[in-house]
Image (tube, rainbow, N blue to C red):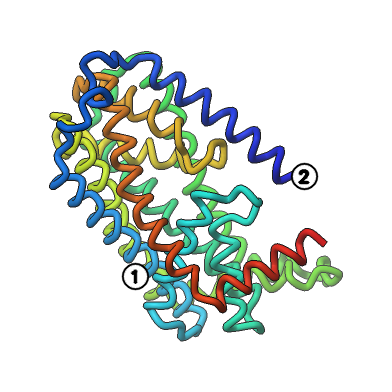
Amino acid sequence: MKAFFVFLLKLILTGFCLWWAFSQVEFDHSVFRKPGVINYVWLAAGVAFAGISLVFLGIRWWFFLRGQAMRVAVGRVVELTMIDSLFSLASVSGLGGDAARILLLIRDYPGKRLVIAMTVMTDHLAGLVSLAVLFFIISVAKFDALVDQSLLGKGVLHFAWFYLGGGLAMVVMIFVCASPPVHRVIHGNNRFSRWPYMQRIPEIYDVYRRNWRYALAGVVTSFFMLFAYFSSYYCGMRAVGGGADYSAVISAMPVIDAISGMPISIAGVGVREKLFEVLMRDLAGVPADTAVAASLAGFACNVFWAGLGALLFLKKRDRVRIAELEASRRD
């Protein structure tokens, strides 16, 4: 019941944000009334870039699994990442994408439950680090353009600075607390003896200090993933006739991705479209109808791979496993 109310709240917020975004659209002269003007070559390119980003996303997780000495095949990791995208898009039941890939991999490695969960968490931290670093580099390189924003655009950017800056500080704090000297002080005198996993979690994180090459490879891979993902939205922009150049889209996407990735709407729908409309107007003078259509086109390019994840999920062992877990959760 709780999962249903959370989903209902997200659905309401998604609808409100979509209404807000579409309230600025002049439909009479928009691509929404002229679907024949869509450039399907650019749309196909967007699908290709979305697929490349998904492969890099899987490889990034693979590096963090290897850092924990887990020898999972790259193909299996990419497959689970595609299934993750499916459940992230349609997590009506409360079983999200991360939970799906964790539980499915636990089936193959039942003795590594906590380790697998921590690799997914560290994978997200790597994504946060790369996104924050990219955002701050863009902020310095295009400072004048980013400062000259509308009131709403400035508010969005200020929130992104605090949100991503706080995220970087959190990542640093986690790994400082996981370092052996600090870890020994925190857990001295068996303070957390009743909760052994509290001691185990910092030890798992500290593995990446010793195996720093895998952690570094994961962060570097994350940059390639981000550029491929952002490129899918640039292709969506070109597919609907938008004239914004690549640098404008790349400048806006770290902010859009960070905020739309917050679990406040269904798959970021609505939030992403409003942010795209505001930032593309401020950075490149893109009309609201084109910006909203470009955002939806880019999202569609990525949804294509969630559909492929659904086909992969049809494999009996994964489908049966999720059904069993759903049944046990309801009981």
Residue 212 located left or right of residue 53 = right
Q: Nearer the viewer, mark 1 or mark 2?
A: 2
Residue 249 located left or right of residue 323 = left
Residue 272 coordinates in the image, percent (x, y):
40, 34
Q: Residues within 10 Å of mark 2 (few under 14, many from 20)?
A: few
Q: Quadrant of residue 199?
A: bottom right
Q: Residue at x 48, y 25 (%)?
A: 17
Find numbered disc 1 in the image and state the secondary structure of the residue it sits on. Answer: helix
Residue 296 located left or right of residue 110 = left
Pick the residue in front: 222 or 210. 222
Q: Amino acid at mark 1?
A: Ala
**Along the polypeptide, which appears first: circle 1 or circle 2?**
2
The residue where tag 1 is placed is 217
Pick the residue in front: 318 or 286. 318
Q: Residue at x 40, y 22 (%)?
A: 21
**Which disc number belongs to residue 1?**
2
Find numbered disc 2 in the image and state the secondary structure of the residue it sits on. Answer: loop
Q: Quadrant of residue 117?
A: bottom right
Q: Residues within 10 Å of mark 1 (few under 14, many from 20)?
A: some
Q: Is residue 237 visible?
A: yes
Q: Amino acid at mark 2?
A: Met
Q: Residue at x 31, y 39 (%)?
A: 253
Residue 218 coordinates in the image, percent (x, y):
38, 67
Marks 1,2: beta carbons within 8 A: no
Q: Vertical placement of 233 versus 176: above or below?
A: above
Pick the residue in front: 36 or 284. 36
Residue 195 coordinates in the image, percent (x, y):
81, 68
Residue 227 located left or right of residue 60 = left
